[in-house]
Image (cartoon, rainbow, N blue to C red):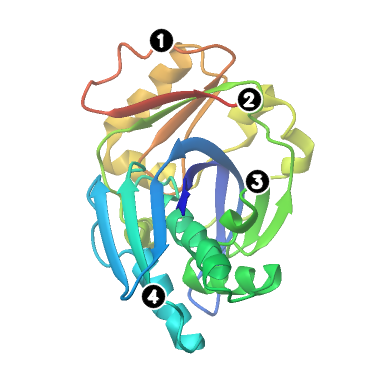
Amino acid sequence: MICFPNAKVNLGLSVLDKRPDDFHNLSTCIIPIPIYDILEINLSETFRFVSYGLKVSGINIIIKTWEYLNGIFDKIAPVNVCLYKNIPMGAGLGGGSSDAIFFLKIINDICELRLSHIELMEIANIIGSDCPFFIDNTSSIVTGKGDIISKVDNPFAGKYITLIYPQINISTKNAFSFVKHNSSATDYSAILDNELLWRNHISNDFEEFVFSEHPHLLKLKNKLYQHNALYTSLTGSGSSLYAISEKEMDISWIDKSYFVQQRYMG
């Protein structure tokens, strides 16, 4: 079975406070975007994982998900997993979380685990903070540690998104250790349907740290506004920037070494 785990971006990201479980309470709006990895899973005699494309560092989250499932179920049929990695890691795009949840849902089907939606959400919450979003994989306001999800209409519908990954891997753990806690969450219900308000009312708390470490990214963000972006922001804990525009943006000026993708959001 072949599937296409997609990336996501954050429209705003507030880090509110640290929880007793060492996670952080967050407030964000997450939107799926049409940039994809390719994941093929087939029943096999033994479990095997291989990856191609962009480099995958460390123990892949798919392997961790497989090991977790084997800890709670007896005799899951082994599978052969082939991942083609197109979504950059450490870019704030949620590619690893998306891979894990697409894998989880396929294993639930082909191995007949019969996990309910609630049970899938519980497992996703254990796997990682971005993971519960990808169970339903639709535009949502997300709070708590990423486990409280309220679906909304896609605020980028009918717009173009330009995504820029500057080939910088930002450690999520490191970013959280430096981020300053925000005293209040964005009231998305009041401004989500009016993109003219986003620039002055929606922000990503990780920008201060990431831009201090990589000042050229702040210059890039400002230049995107000069090229008629309606809104531009870091996504997640970085390092990717995205810009929302009414029409396709001129991207000829962007550094050729950067990963740049432009998509219509439907």
Mark 1: give few (<14), some (14-19) or many (20+) Cα within 10 Å: few
Residue 97 on image: x %, y %: 46, 57
Mark carried by residue 266: 2
Q: Residue at x 78, y 37 (%)?
A: 190
3 or 1: mark nearer the eye = 3
* Label annotation for residue 250: 1
Q: What residue type is labelled 1?
A: Asp
Say the numbered circle drawn on residue 193: none
| Label 4 sits on residue | 78
Of badges 4 and 3, nearer the viewer stands 4
For the residues marked 1 and 4, what is the alpha-carbon distance in whole angstroms?
47 Å
Q: Do the residues labelled 1 and 2 touch (CB within 8 Å)?
A: no
Secondary structure state at the residue bearing disc 3: loop
Q: Which residue is drawn at 63% across and 29% down?
A: 156
Q: Quadrant of residue 122?
A: bottom right
Work out whether mark 1 precedes mark 4 in sequence or the reverse, and give the earlier one.
4
Amino acid at the residue labelled 4: Pro
